[in-house]
Amino acid sequence: MKIQIVNNTIKTLCVFVLGFTLVNCENSKVEVQQKAEFKLQYDEPAKKWTEALPVGNGTLGAMIYGGVAQEHIQFNEETLWRGQPHDYSNEDAGNYLGEIRQLLTEGKSREAHKLAQDEFMSEPLKQVHYQPFGDMYISFKNHENVTNYKRVLNLNDAISSVSYTINGVEYKREVLVSYPDHIIAVNLTSSTDKALNFDLWLDAIHEDKSVITSNDSQTLVVKVKDGVLRGVSTLKVNTNGTIKNVAGKLQVSEASNATIYLTAATNYIDFKDVSGEPEKIVPETLAKVSNTNYDTVKAKHIDDYQKLYNRFQLSFGDNGKSKNPTDQRISDFSETPNDPQLLALYVEYARYLTIASSRPGTKPATLQGIWNDKLTPPWFSSYTTNINLEMNYWPVEMYNLSECHEPLFDLIEDLSVTGAKVAKAHYNADGWIVHHNVDIWRGAAPVNASHHGIWLGGAAWLSSHIWEHYLYTQDKVFLEKRYPLMRNAALFYSQFLYEDPNTGYLISSPSNSPEIGGLVAGPTMDHQLIRALFRSTIEASKLLNTDQEFASTLKTMIDKIAPNQIGKHGQLQEWMEDKDDPENHHRHVSHLWAVHPGKEINYEDTPDSMEAAKQSLLYRGDNGTGWSLAWKINFWSRFRDGDHAYKLLHKLLSPAERPNGKVGGGSYPNLFDAHPPFQIDGNFGGASGILEMILQSHLDKIELLPALPSALPQGRVSGIVARGGFELSFSWENSELKNVEVLSKAGGKCTLSYRNRHIEFNTSKGETYTFDGNLNSK
Ligand code: FUC
């Protein structure tokens, strides 16, 4: 609960609005905000993985099925991958760069592809898979005739629970993953003595595995091995019943409570070093917590989690549907989209998933966050940088989880090392580069195939996250620390850009417009990315008072880079040539990068390009799945068309599993986004699109309700963050802005904009400024 005292005075009128309690009276105001309860809930156990509920602490992740007679908790540890430390760069690739460019200049695309495929790709051609770790099973005796079954993931405390009654005995299970204690905790209780009787065991789907039980009968160990990485996971059970070790299973009898603590680790230290000692780390971690009672572990977990989760609150108005099972809400919404609070749940769930998959010191969220149950997961469950990895971090600053961005910056540090080798070997350039895919060994060279693997935007796009983090936080210490990454990415492009003999422009070649049109010279997206990087590097160098000479080199280059062009169909050209096909409904829409997440194309500075970009999006159409739909929602928000954005949100939130048994785009019962299969980028991109409907700040001003759909006429948000270091709270009713509060976290000028009204004011660090719906100061 957050208690905010404004002007040190008190009012006393009590109203309940959209899940927030406002206490008000005449001359003064105390605002008591109680965070609305957000839950995923079900009346049945999960039958499939995409029905199970995810928990995680950034390193350990688990999926809970909630079965009655048998519980299955499938778990992951983020460093268990295949392979070994490896430099994927191809020493000889650089010898062929000139020839590939020349072939593209001459329009000999087939020859260019072949040469690139034969001589320019990574060694080996494929990166490696992220792996599942293990499975915990709990099998209960005499568990028939169940009533009152409920399965819940409570976002307010990050605890997943299962409860039911059998013969008058109430059973309850709770599962959490603690970041401070680094364990998965499972707590089991029964309402009467001696009613809890179960067998507990560990397993794994790896071929190379061993399960060991210890002499004390309280501990089980599972060991798995993949490539050079070995994983060790140990659990310990504490109970008021008895424990016996029977044929590799722990048999707990006549108990009324039992707590299981499990932790896991591998020998991975970083992409060059696998000398870790999980055999030591795991027992040490477990020993620290194993004699602590569950309530203490739980209280510490809730305290840690809520420090992040409670900073932000969003409500679109609860019309009673939030009491329904989540799978039913998803299917009801697809029929009649009148459950506005489901969209607020979608955003809060994305925040929950961010906290569960990306905490300081952990690895960034992969294509599936940290949750994976397959030895050969879709797209390796790795990091795809031509949209997916970045999308995972689109909403992170805005929904006030700035520190959860850090794992991405650490990954960029790694890539600046491996990517420097690739820059030298493949392009004979300084600085660093990364192509479209990255694994745990920080592979940065072009993988798979020349028609999509040779994409040059990775270093620029990732670097934009460093700049964005600075814009949101105004943290100069951070900027100083990470600036060399931006600078060295810019250095690479400044040497890589090539003067196109056909047009005289500087272009990116060879490259591709992600996954469409093959290997080309000069895709529009690359140029937008490179210009944005050069501009932010110039600004950063000014702020840090460094690299002036390099900055002026970049400045002169910007105008020489091939510009955005409008083609014969009124579209924004995806390539140098005017060859876009208006009938092509491909999922990637990369040439609109400058509309979102970039800002070069906008209504104020470049209205014609903005219209052309909109035309391109109309040609691509509204269909799509997963991240593609999510990106389109963000575009329509930037096009200030909230109703169009809402139409696509409706698709994003429709059941992925169709009545005819087919699986398409939409949401799985556990609200995981369906590409299909599950990819977490859509969850984060969708949340970003919803937030972009109510606040945008990319144009040096804070626009309130810039793309509010008519279906969301009322709402309230607090703790939403805008660039410039401002944290805002505001509400709206009948689609009209009501009250606005701006907390200035860094001082400086603030510009607020609502419809045709703009105000500008100076702020002092730590002060809050309040306005009515017409932006009149209060
Ligand atoms: C890119 C996309 C695919 C998928 C994969 C992980 O290759 O084109 O749709 O999201 O990444």
Image (cartoon, rainbow, N blue to C red):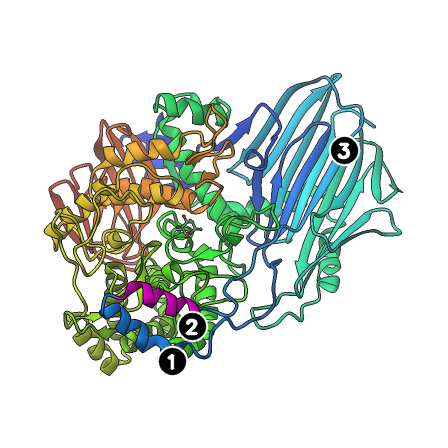
Q: At x 34% / y 68%, what residue is drawn?
A: 476
Q: What residue did someone put label 1 on?
A: 95
Q: Magenta stretch: residue 359 in it?
A: no
The disc labelled 2 sits on which kind of residue?
A: Glu
Residue 409, above or below 193: below
Residue 559 spot, x, y in % from top left: 15, 70
The disc labelled 3 sits on which kind of residue?
A: Ser
Residue 137 visible in the snapshot: yes
Residue 10 visible in the snapshot: no
Q: Is residue 141 left or right of residue 170?
A: right
Q: Which mark is residue 139?
A: 3
Sequence-earlier tag: 1 or 3: 1
Farthest bottom residue? 549
Q: Is residue 506 left or right of residue 150?
A: left
For the residue pair 501 and 352, the one nearer the viewer reads as 501
The disc labelled 1 sits on which kind of residue?
A: Asn
The boundaries of the magenta stretch are 108-120
Residue 399 spot, x, y in % from top left: 38, 47
Q: Magenta stretch: residue 115 in it?
A: yes
Q: Residues within 10 Å of mark 3 (few under 14, many from 20)?
A: some
Q: At x 28% / y 80%, what residue is drawn?
A: 547
Residue 764 spot, x, y in % from top left: 26, 58
Sequence-earlier tag: 1 or 2: 1
Q: What residue did someone put label 2 on?
A: 119
Question: Which secondary structure, mark 1?
Answer: helix
Residue 31, above or below 726: above
In contact (CB < 8 Å): disc 1 and disc 2: yes
For the residue pair 3 and 557, the one nearer the viewer reads as 557
